[in-house]
């Protein structure tokens, strides 16, 4: 066995692929302080900025996915794919990893393909309840597939699946003790219920429009609102800071305190958000984005809703927003049931369980 373990991770395109990869790397670094890490991403995507900020080296591949609409960009896809496979071979050969982990995104395909072909222990971490075509293909070649939802044998070989959950920020595990701190941080009235609205760091236009059109009805319910508009929309919505009980934010630097202070959460249904909200254990109204591959956010949300653990509002049903909100605000029994049921779906030890699977396939344990 090598004295220094060499670990390669690939995942990107969105935060939902990047942050799980970083969380896994951090847990591995905890266990193996002398390990060497190399991330591989798509050269023009956000991982090229976020991964170095987390303290890890990254190499970029010239790769992009097929566009769902007919576009000239698709003509370059075969060229980019061949180039990225060639570059992936060079990167793997030079780094000589002991294990390769893919968390999704364009770059993980070529890297895992090369690793599996060379017999390097490899693992996929699938965040969503609906698996994309790349991971379906790769699952036949890798050693293990760590999943966050049940019944994933529809997509992957059942003998390779391990139900671990998704990695989440560790500071969310202790939010129950941070409620007062959260209320002070956001200057909230402790006597009122707080609605936390999340549209992601960039923002969600549809969610912002729903909140704007229902703002007065919401305030008439004697609630206060922490409204994360996203950086693209803050200029449009910051005028509502003049309303008593409303505060808008481009982004939230202390998500743990925002969750701790909240009584109800309105959120998109990306895989990481869903996993975090299970840990948080507050009543949730999911408003999934319909503009994602295979409508996987709706599938993620439905996987929670079918356990009576959240409410679902489609963007096309925006006129039903207040009736859904009042179900939670005016029915303490229902609110408590939603909170209890979503908490029961939490997998707080996901990162550790994924790393244990990595140790097994790498024969480190």
Image (cartoon, rainbow, N blue to C red):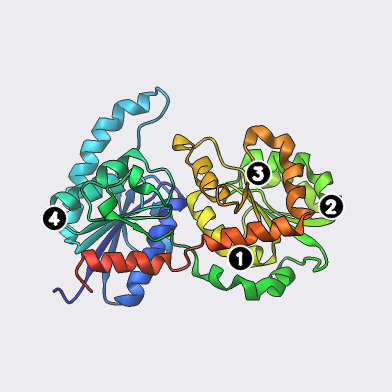
Q: Is residue 30 left or right of residue 313?
A: left
Comparing 289 with 226, the one in front is 289
- Which of discs 3 and 4 lies nearer the camera? The answer is 4
The kind of secondary structure element at disc 1 is loop
Q: Are marks 2 and 4 in contact (CB under 8 Å)?
A: no
The kind of secondary structure element at disc 2 is loop
Q: Quadrant of the N terminus?
A: bottom left
Q: Are marks 2 and 1 in contact (CB under 8 Å)?
A: no
- Residue 233, labelled with which disc? 3
Instruction: Give me the residue at 18% from left, 51% from top.
Output: 116
The residue pinned by badge 4 equals: 119
- Which of discs 2 and 1 lies nearer the camera? The answer is 2
**Which of the marked residues, 3 or 4, is nearer the chain's N terminus?**
4
When asked about the image quadrant of residue 263, the answer is bottom right
**Which of the marked residues, 2 or 1, is nearer the chain's N terminus?**
2
How far across and down, in percent of the image, does residue 96 sit? 16, 61
Q: Are marks 1 and 4 in contact (CB under 8 Å)?
A: no
How far across and down, in percent of the image, does residue 19 sit? 44, 58
- Which of discs 1 and 3 lies nearer the camera? The answer is 1
Whether residue 100 is visible, yes or no, is: yes
């Amino acid at each position: 066995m090598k004295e220094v373990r060499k670990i390669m991770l690939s995942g990107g395109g969105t935060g939902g692929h990047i942050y799980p990869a970083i969380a896994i790397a951090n847990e591995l670094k905890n266990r193996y302080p002398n390990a060497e890490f190399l991330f591989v991403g798509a050269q023009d995507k956000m991982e090229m900025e976020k991964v170095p900020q987390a303290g890890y080296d990254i190499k970029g591949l010239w790769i992009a996915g097929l566009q769902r609409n007919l576009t000239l960009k698709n003509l370059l896809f075969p060229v980019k794919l061949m180039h990225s496979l060639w570059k992936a071979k060079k990167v793997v050969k030079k780094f000589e990893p002991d294990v390769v982990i893919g968390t999704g995104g364009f770059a993980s395909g070529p890297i895992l393909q090369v690793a599996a072909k060379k017999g390097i222990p490899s693992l996929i971490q699938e965040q969503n309840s609906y698996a994309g075509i790349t991971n379906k293909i790769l699952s036949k070649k890798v050693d293990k597939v760590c999943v966050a939802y049940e019944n994933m044998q529809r997509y992957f070989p059942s003998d390779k699946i391990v139900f671990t959950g998704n990695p989440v920020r560790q500071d969310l595990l202790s939010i129950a003790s941070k409620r007062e701190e959260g209320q002070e941080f956001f200057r909230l009235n402790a006597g009122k219920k707080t609605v936390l609205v999340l549209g992601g760091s960039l923002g969600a236009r549809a969610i912002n429009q729903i909140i704007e059109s229902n703002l007065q009805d919401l305030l008439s319910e004697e609630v206060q609102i922490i409204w994360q508009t996203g950086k693209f929309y803050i200029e449009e919505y910051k005028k509502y800071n003049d309303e008593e009980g409303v505060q808008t934010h481009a982004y939230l630097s202390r998500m743990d305190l925002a969750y701790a202070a909240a009584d109800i959460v309105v959120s998109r249904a990306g895989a990481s958000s869903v996993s975090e909200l299970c840990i948080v254990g507050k009543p949730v109204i999911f408003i999934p984005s319909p503009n994602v591959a295979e409508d996987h956010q709706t599938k993620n949300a439905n996987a929670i809703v079918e356990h009576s653990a959240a409410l679902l509002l489609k963007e096309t049903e925006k006129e039903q927003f207040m009736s859904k909100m009042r179900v939670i605000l005016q029915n303490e029994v229902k609110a408590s049931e939603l909170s209890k049921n979503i908490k029961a779906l939490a997998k707080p030890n996901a990162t550790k369980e994924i790393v244990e699977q990595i140790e097994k396939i790498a024969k480190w344990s």
